[in-house]
């Protein structure tokens, strides 16, 4: 609410009583019809005011440049009021109107606003200075207008005095949505904030990111440019250049500025899409220069000229390139073409604009050739229909041409339904608000007309009605939410047509393209600082502009699914991608399969080992009492054969898909059983040394240590303890490994590598002792060459497992188990080949060494050159005794 001081200032500045500053103001009324409730209208029917030059006194000025399109807007308001008066919407109530021409001048618009705020329809009364205006009743209840934002802004501030509802049909500046400053301002079009958002969205959808912006240097142009740049930054759209150009056309300086502008357009590489926030006169100048220089670009039009007939009439306009634009949502006004065909003021009405229009066309005055001239305010223009073929605006009558023919061929064909329909909606919204305010129902309304404008304003905010099958209402900012049409200029039969190819919905803020060919058109236009990075690539910025960059392929294991991605995305743990991929593929699940050729070979050797053990067991059983069999342990060799059998069986758990149980049992199964074998070999090595130790004292000491069964139990007990601790604290387990590219590896993890190493190391320590003892007895005259075979078998074991360690560490794929299987098989075959097979060979193929006589003969030959023949005989007896009694001999 205004304070007393503020109200006093307003009164002093404008129409303070009792000064009669408006005695002749009624002479400026352009159209008038008295009703029960009057609606004001403010339209820029003329383009500018012509003053005496120089203007040295505040005298009256003459309006110049009658604009036919704005005249059509005005007729839309009058026709809509007549429709409502002839409809049951407001039964028993007649709406009137009082319409003025601002001549596109802000000062004149302010005077008109003050006139509307006077109390009666008499120039003897004026705006009173009050503490408040709650009960103030001006001559009109609401005002339709103005078209241009620059004019709507000052009159909206004036209407704030009494909260007079002002409904604009074309002023779209974003600042007018500020309800703190423009409390009573409403509009039947969206705010420019939506337009710039829609333009940025359209450019993003078209994959352009290097854009030029041209705007007029007025409030509208600067605001639109700033809003668009803000939205463009959200979408990573870069501005190649931005230029402001004067709204005052015709001067030499203006022409030079346009020449410089077009030169800059030509000089910027790759900026092939340009947005123009400008009125049609400026656009005409720019595009004429573009045509003359034969420059081809893609142009994005704001709603100020997106369906401008003046711009469409530029010669060779089709050579400038593609033109897209935004237009306000259109609709049809019932009976409006018939209204234009029969232009006349109604009963008791005055319409000076019709008289001027007729005079211009019948006299063919110079002004009739300029009737498309728009204001020099540089603000928002209007919209045409969604597919309008522009006609010439030179509308002089021909010989014998009637008024109806003029109107039919000219006015009707040039109805710009964007602006006219928005005017229609403005009047309809007032009527529906009045219906709610006056509680009209069942054919009657309350005939109480002494309500204040602010009460109607409250009703307008709650308006919600259906028009053209779509709901209409004002949002909390007083803006309509009916969106925009996306327009494409096309050439048809040599003339420009404006084709609706899509729309922008302000509610969900999304672009919808209906014409599928538009995508092909936009894709053919390159307007990017750099070539777009394809899916499978990412951007690396090489300048301060985020749109200027290089493209590099995504690394292995990464991908990008969209164009111009800043970063590649990492594939999920079970997927993989090659370098430069746009998708991830599932990894191949791998393990050491049974059908693998290597696995088959290993299993053949394992089975062969099992068969050999069975054959050896049978042979041992048949020749159990022979010296060679007794030398390998006699009945105890069954324990060794079972241990070797289980060691061969352990290889089964290394092949095939791993399981938790298989991972848990396979290493201890091999380790414990092979420890039994090595412990047995250790006992044999000790026995050989003991058999040929002739010093009685040493021999007696060694005989006390030679306890085969305790040695075997102790050695294996230690290994059992090692394996038990391993399995209990951190044993082997089944895991799924994703570390190998392209492969999901199913494997057994050893749990504690230290425990695994201790288990193998313990066997290696026993093997080293065996090797050392056997090496000490390498020259013993052993008929069965036990020491040599023990040495050789332990060398095999040590070499195999020493080689196994680096191979095992550096192998991490499905063949890792195969490495250990090879080591196990080699170790097992070393035992079989060095300890069992030679004895079997002697038993069945060298029977002469399988008797007491044969052994004695062999030793006699060995010592025939020895002086102590008795020592040779004693050695023979000792060897026979050891070999005959097996590992338990003392």
Image (cartoon, helix red, strand yellow):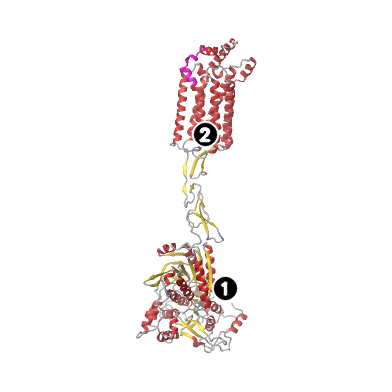
Helix, strand or loop for disc 1: loop
Region in magenta: 838-852
In the depicted structure, whether residue 493 falls above or below residue 62: above
Image coordinates for residue 844, horizontal then vertical, percent: 46, 18
**Which residue is the extreme one toward the right?**
697
In the depicted structure, whether residue 755 falls above or below residue 173: above
**Which residue is the extreme one toward the front?**
293
Image coordinates for residue 733, horizontal then vertical, percent: 53, 38
Residue that label 2 marks: 665
Q: Is residue 799 magenta?
A: no
Q: Would residue 475 be seen by someone viewing this image from the given angle?
A: no
- Quarter of the picture containing the N terminus is bottom right
Left or right placement of residue 841 versus residue 161 in this view: left
Q: Is residue 847 magenta?
A: yes
Image coordinates for residue 95, horizontal then vertical, percent: 45, 81
- Quarter of the picture containing the C terminus is top right
Of 111 and 405, the residue lying toward us: 405
Residue that label 1 marks: 180
């Amino acid at each position: 609410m205004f304070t007393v001081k503020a109200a006093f200032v307003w009164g002093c500045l404008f129409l303070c009583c009792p000064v009669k500053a408006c005695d002749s103001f009624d002479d400026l009324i352009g159209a008038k019809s008295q009703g029960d409730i009057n609606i004001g209208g403010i339209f820029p029917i003329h383009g500018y005011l012509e003053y005496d030059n120089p203007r040295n006194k505040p005298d009256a000025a003459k309006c110049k440049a009658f604009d036919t399109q704005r005249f059509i807007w005005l007729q839309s308001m009058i026709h809509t009021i007549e429709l409502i008066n002839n409809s049951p919407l407001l039964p028993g109530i007649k709406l009137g109107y009082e319409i003025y021409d601002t001549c596109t001048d802000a000062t004149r618009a302010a005077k008109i606003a003050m006139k509307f705020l006077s109390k009666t329809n008499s120039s003897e009364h004026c705006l009173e200075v009050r503490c408040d205006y709650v009960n103030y009743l001006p001559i009109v209840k609401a005002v339709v207008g103005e078209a241009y934002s620059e004019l709507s802004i000052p009159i909206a501030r004036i209407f704030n005095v009494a909260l007079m509802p002002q409904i604009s049909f074309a002023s779209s500046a974003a600042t007018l949505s500020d309800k703190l400053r423009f409390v009573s301002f409403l509009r039947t079009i969206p705010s420019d904030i939506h337009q710039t958002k829609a333009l940025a969205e359209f450019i993003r959808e078209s994959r352009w990111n290097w854009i030029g912006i041209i705007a007029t240097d007025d409030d509208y142009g600067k605001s639109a440019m700033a809003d668009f740049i803000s939205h463009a930054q959200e979408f990573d759209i870069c501005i190649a250049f931005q230029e402001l150009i004067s709204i005052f056309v015709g001067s030499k300086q203006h022409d030079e500025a346009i020449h410089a502008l077009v030169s800059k357009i030509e000089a910027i590489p790759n900026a092939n899409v340009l947005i123009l926030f400008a009125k049609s006169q400026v656009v005409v100048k720019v595009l004429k220069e573009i045509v003359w220089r034969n420059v081809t670009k893609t142009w994005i039009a704001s709603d100020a000229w997106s369906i401008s007939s003046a711009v469409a009439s530029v010669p060779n306009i089709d050579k400038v390139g593609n033109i897209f634009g935004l237009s306000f949502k259109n609709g049809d006004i019932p009976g409006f073409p018939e209204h234009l065909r029969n232009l006349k003021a109604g009963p008791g009405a005055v319409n000076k604009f019709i008289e001027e229009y007729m005079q211009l066309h019948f006299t063919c005055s110079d002004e009739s050739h300029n009737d498309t001239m728009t204001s020099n305010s540089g603000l928002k223009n209007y919209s045409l229909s969604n597919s309008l073929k522009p006609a010439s605006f030179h509308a002089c009558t021909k010989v014998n041409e009637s008024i109806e023919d003029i109107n039919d061929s000219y006015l009707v064909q040039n109805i710009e339904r964007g602006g006219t329909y928005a005017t229609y909606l403005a009047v309809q919204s007032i009527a529906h608000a009045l219906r709610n305010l006056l509680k009209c129902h069942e054919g009657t309304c309350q005939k109480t007309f002494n309500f204040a404008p602010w009460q109607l304003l409250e009703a307008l905010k709650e308006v919600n009605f259906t028009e053209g099958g779509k709901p209409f209402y004002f949002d909390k900012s007083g803006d309509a939410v009916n969106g925009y049409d996306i327009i494409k200029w096309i050439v048809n039969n040599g003339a420009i047509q404006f084709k609706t190819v899509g729309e922008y919905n302000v509610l969900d803020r999304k672009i919808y393209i209906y014409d599928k060919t538009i995508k092909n058109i936009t894709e053919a236009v390159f307007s990017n600082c750099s070539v777009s990075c394809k899916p499978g690539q990412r951007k690396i910025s090489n300048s301060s502009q985020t749109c200027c960059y290089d493209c590099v392929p995504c690394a292995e294991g990464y991908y990008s699914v969209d164009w111009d991605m800043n970063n590649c995305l990492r594939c999920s743990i079970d997927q993989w991608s090659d370098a430069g991929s746009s998708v991830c593929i599932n990894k191949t699940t791998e393990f050491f399969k049974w059908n693998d050729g290597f696995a088959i070979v290993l299993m053949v050797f394992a089975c062969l080992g099992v068969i050999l053990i069975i054959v050896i067991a049978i042979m041992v059983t048949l020749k159990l009492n022979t010296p060679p069999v007794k030398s390998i342990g006699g009945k105890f060799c069954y324990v060794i054969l079972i241990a070797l059998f289980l060691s061969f069986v352990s290889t089964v758990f290394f092949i095939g898909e791993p399981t938790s149980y298989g991972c848990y049992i396979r290493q201890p199964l091999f380790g414990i059983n092979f420890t039994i074998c090595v412990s047995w070999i250790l006992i044999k090595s000790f026995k050989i040394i003991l058999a040929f130790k002739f010093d009685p004292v040493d021999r007696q000491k060694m005989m006390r240590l030679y306890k085969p069964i305790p040695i075997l139990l102790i050695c294996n007990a230690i290994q059992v303890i090692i394996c038990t601790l391993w399995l209990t604290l951190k044993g082997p387990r089944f895991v799924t490994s994703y570390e190998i590219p392209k492969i999901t590896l199913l494997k057994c993890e050893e749990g504690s590598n230290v425990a695994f190493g201790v288990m193998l190391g313990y066997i290696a320590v026993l093997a080293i002792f065996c090797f050392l003892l056997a090496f000490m007895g390498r020259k013993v005259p052993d008929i069965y060459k036990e020491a040599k075979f023990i040495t050789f078998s332990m060398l095999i074991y040590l070499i195999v497992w020493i080689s196994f360690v680096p191979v095992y560490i550096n192998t991490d794929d499905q063949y890792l188990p195969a490495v250990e299987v090879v080591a196990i098989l080699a170790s097992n075959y070393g035992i079989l080949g060095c300890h069992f097979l030679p004895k079997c060979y002697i038993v069945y193929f060298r029977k002469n060494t399988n008797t007491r006589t044969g052994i004695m003969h062999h030793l006699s030959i060995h010592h025939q050159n020895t002086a102590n023949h008795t020592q040779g005989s004693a050695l023979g007896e000792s060897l026979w005794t050891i070999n005959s009694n097996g590992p338990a001999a003392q």
